[in-house]
Image: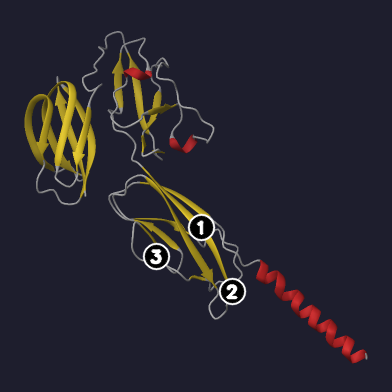
Amino acid sequence: MNKIVFKTVLIVAFFGSILPAVAQFSAVNDEFVVSSSSVPLVVGNVLTNDNLNSPAVYVSNPILAGPITLSASGEVSVQPNLDPMCFAISYTICIPGTILCSTAVCLVTVTPLPPVAPLMQSLPFNSTLANLVVSGQNILWYANPTAGRSVTEMPLPLSTPLVNGTTYYASQTVNGIESKERLPVTVTLSALATANYTFADFSYYFDADASQLELHNATTIDQIQLFDLTGKSLFTNAIGLSKATVGLPNLATGTYVVVLQSQGSRFTFKVVKQ
């Protein structure tokens, strides 16, 4: 009788050491945010936040193709030139040689690039945020850079008076997703400054497949230049119109910088050839 009781105690003690370890094995949902890029980017690893009981754990259902890829070691990558969008992927982690597996969801949000604008702008006194020249969609202005923002931060009204020497930060929202990064614009106010709104009403559309760049401005655009990201000049042409369609043929896939000139002012923005 004593021997049977002793064996029972051993069985209880044995399972008591295993069950907590099994309970600790669970995948945790992940979320990554990354700006759209012209090159593939590694955004993180789904195993980093998981509460794991085995160092040999692996992803049993890797995703090897598509806009978002997931390696067996948990590395998450995004493909280049993605439109702003939120992607959700489900993954399962397992311990080799066992039936112990756990499933979680990884959210990857690709945000647009920040808007483009001259980084230093000189304006007359009594100017407001609405007077700053910037190109993008659904522009929002903030008092803080990306690193300092919080989820409760509110954008500044366009009627906000500009303060001399102050830097303001602009985002743009595309497909309902706000850019992760913000563009800094530093303001100088002067009684001698003239309100130069040459590109205040500027807009463009780039057909990335056909390489047709449509330009729309309130004033005449004098010249267009195209550069690659190394600064090499690829294309220069006179325009002399406020609305024009410019053909940019023979462009390899990648990101390019466009520089426009009008009435002595320069305006710069990027286009992506897909």
First along the sequence among labels 1 and 2: 2
Give SS at disc 1: strand
CA distance for labels 1 and 3: 13 Å
Name the residue beneath numbered marker 2.
Answer: 100
First along the sequence among labels 1 and 3: 3
- Residue 63 is tagged as 3
Specify the color scheme.
secondary structure
Q: Position of residue 90 (x, y in %)?
A: 48, 61
Three-letter code, disc 3: Ile
Name the residue beneath numbered marker 1.
Answer: 105
Residue lying at 26% horizontally and 13% vertically, measured from the top left: 195
- Residue 205 is tagged as none
Looking at the image, which is closer to me, 273 or 227?
273
Q: Within 10 Å of the Cα at label 3, are there few (<14), some (14-19), or many (20+) other Cα atoms?
A: some
Three-letter code, disc 2: Leu
CA distance for labels 1 and 2: 18 Å
Give SS at disc 2: loop
